[in-house]
């Protein structure tokens, strides 16, 4: 029987004004708004008891600040900022409202789905699967973006990760928490996807749309 190597907690960043206004951010370096800061502190409290041994975040401020809130409860755990964890590069669409018209094929500067899928898979192999083996399973924190998380998880489910019992795929909302358990042989189980039970506000008060994730269709 395969032995658990790690549990990976994948968190989407807190809310930004751009999220609220349905503006495509991509790799534009937006900041958390007041609600996003509150959400960051709530997810930090929800993950307080997790014995993190490693932490990774997109270097974009909305993600790295969310990660910093979480690690306030985990002093001594270094935070590695990685450009590979950035949202999809949306090129000419960045800063525009969702639904904006993109340039014709061949002229667009938007990162292709194929390139993004390759980037997420490469990051997983180079970072998560390369975590050093320990006598006890490692708990790794990963803070990224809705589009990145969706592409990463879908790619994993198409390969060596299976969907856990009663786990359903859905929207990846702000500060939602997904958990993947990885075995020594590299196989894994998605045991939780996009949970926001730590948020005090009702689900309908959380931004339902994600312009960047919706933009993955372009």
Image (cartoon, rainbow, N blue to C red):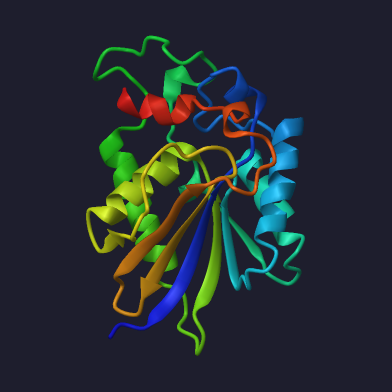
Is 72 rendered above or below residue 49? above
Q: Quadrant of the N terminus?
A: bottom left
> Depth check: 20 or 96 in front?
20
**Residue 45: % across, % down:** 72, 56
Considering every residue shown, the one lying at the far bottom of the view is 135
Q: Position of residue 15 (x, y in %)?
A: 64, 33
Residue drawn at 51 percent across, 13 percent down: 97
> Residue 92 is drawn in which quadrant?
top left
Query: Could you tell me residue 142's position as x and y percent?
Result: 54, 56
Position of residue 122 relative to residue 211, above or below, is below
**From the viewer's perspective, is residue 214 above or below residue 183?**
above
> Looking at the image, can residue 87 be seen?
no
Which residue is found at the position 52% from the left and 33% from the top?
Answer: 27
Identify which residue is drawn at 72% across, 30% down.
33
The residue shown at (64%, 39%) is 14
How many numbered circles does the render carry?
0
The x and y percentages for residue 28 are 57, 29
Q: Determine which quarter of the picture holds residue 214.
A: top left
Outermost residue on the top side: it is 101
Q: Is 109 on the left-hand or right-hand side of 53? A: left
Can residue 79 be spotted in the picture?
yes
Q: Quadrant of the C terminus?
A: top left
């Amino acid at each position: 029987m395969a032995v658990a190597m790690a549990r990976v907690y994948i968190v989407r960043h807190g809310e930004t004004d751009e999220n609220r206004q349905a503006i495509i951010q991509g790799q534009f370096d937006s900041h958390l708004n007041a609600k996003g800061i509150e959400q960051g502190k709530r997810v930090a409290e929800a993950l307080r008891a997790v014995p993190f041994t490693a932490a990774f975040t997109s270097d974009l401020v909305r993600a790295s600040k969310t990660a910093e809130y979480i690690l306030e409860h985990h002093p001594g755990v270094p935070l590695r900022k990685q450009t590979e964890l950035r949202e999809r590069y949306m090129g000419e669409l960045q800063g525009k409202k969702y639904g904006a018209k993109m340039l014709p094929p061949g002229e667009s500067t938007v990162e292709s789905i194929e390139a993004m899928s390759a980037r997420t898979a490469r990051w997983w192999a180079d970072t998560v699967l390369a975590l050093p083996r320990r006598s006890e399973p490692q708990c790794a924190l990963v803070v990224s973006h809705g589009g990145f998380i969706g592409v990463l998880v879908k790619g994993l489910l198409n390969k060596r990760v299976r969907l856990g019992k009663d786990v359903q795929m859905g929207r990846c909302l702000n500060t939602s928490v997904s958990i993947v358990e990885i075995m020594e042989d590299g196989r894994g189980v998605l045991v939780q996807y996009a949970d926001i039970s730590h948020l005090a506000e009702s689900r309908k008060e959380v931004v339902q749309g994600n312009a960047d994730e919706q933009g993955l269709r372009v």
